Image (tube, rainbow, N blue to C red):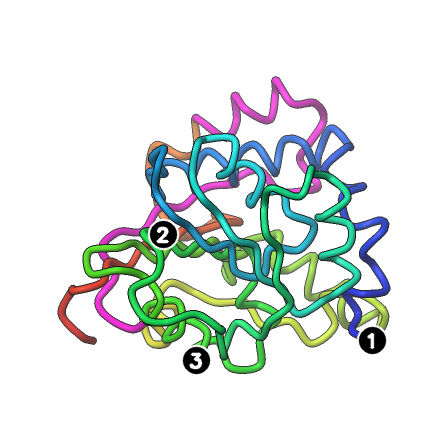
Amino acid sequence: MTLFDQKAESYDDFCRTPLGHFVDAVERRLIGAMARPRSGESAIDLGCGTGSYTYWLHKLGLSVTGVDLSEKMLEVARRKGDGRVPFIRADVTHLPFPPDSFDLALANATLEFVADPKAALREAYRVVKPGGRVVVGFIAKLGPWAEQYSKRGREDATSVYHGARFFSYEEAVEIGPCIPEQVRFGLYVSPREFTDEASAWSLEMRRRVSQDEAGAGFMVVRWRKGTLPV
């Protein structure tokens, strides 16, 4: 049993809080802008957890498959739907799909918990079609959220962040399958600064003008199949 198995039933609780709702909204907007999902496309949600992004893509009209190693998380995901969205238990570093299967491979806050993130990106790249996108959301290593999660992981061995690895943009480039096509940063509001969603959005948009990595709690990197290798 993994740590994620133990946390499955309560995993969505944070997103139901005002702070969690804000964080989820910021991340989802950034991922949407980078992934550019289009109705009729096929997609794979890597490390799908309880299926939040899987169902989001499905509602946008994509044919999507969720993949996760935690069966307990997948059980929660399946309970949310009507059986039309497939969820498969598999290791993201060894995907049970042939090459060129999907238009889009998405992974949000997944590589932080994978023993071999480079292999996971290589697999994501393998299963997307030529010209397809691999879009990954990272908890930014240089931001305040990674700092908080690292502290939580050090202090609590039962935390999902115990042993998690966080990435800077340079480190994301190093593990990528090719030269990234684009990167965007966001979540410039630290957990200590949050008071309410309206104030947080105002602060977020003021700080986002610079689009610098420094101070960003989240980054999204997009690779496109067919780009020159690193």
Which residue occupies 36% across, 38% down? 37
Q: Which residue is mark 3?
A: 119
- Residue 58 left/right relative to 179: right
Tag 2: amino acid? Leu
- Counting residues from the start of the chain, the first of labels 2 and 3 encountered is 2
Pick whichever, 9 or 153, lies toward us. Answer: 9
Q: Check residue 1 in the rendering and tell me which mark sits there, or answer none.
A: 1
Assess disc 3: are there few (<14), some (14-19) or many (≥20) residues with their C-alpha within 10 Å of its C-alpha: some
Position of 138 relative to 189 (above/below): below
Q: Check residue 104 in the rendering and tell me which mark sits there, or answer none.
A: 2
Q: Position of residue 189 (x, y in %)?
A: 57, 37
- Residue 114 left/right relative to 225: right
Query: Considering the image in quadrants, where does the N terminus appear?
Result: bottom right
- Residue 136 left/right relative to 149: left
Q: CA distance from mark 2 to mark 3?
A: 17 Å
- Secondary element type, mark 3: helix
- Counting residues from the start of the chain, the first of labels 1 and 3 encountered is 1
Which residue occupies 30% across, 54% down? 133
Tag 1: amino acid? Met
Position of 29 relative to 100 (above/below): above
Q: Position of residue 166 (x, y in %)?
A: 54, 67
Q: Position of residue 53 (x, y in %)?
A: 56, 43
Q: From which residue to which does the magenta span run?
A: 177-205
Which residue occupies 33% across, 35% down? 38
Which residue occupies 48% across, 73% down? 95
Quarter of the image holding residue 181? bottom left
- Secondary element type, mark 1: loop
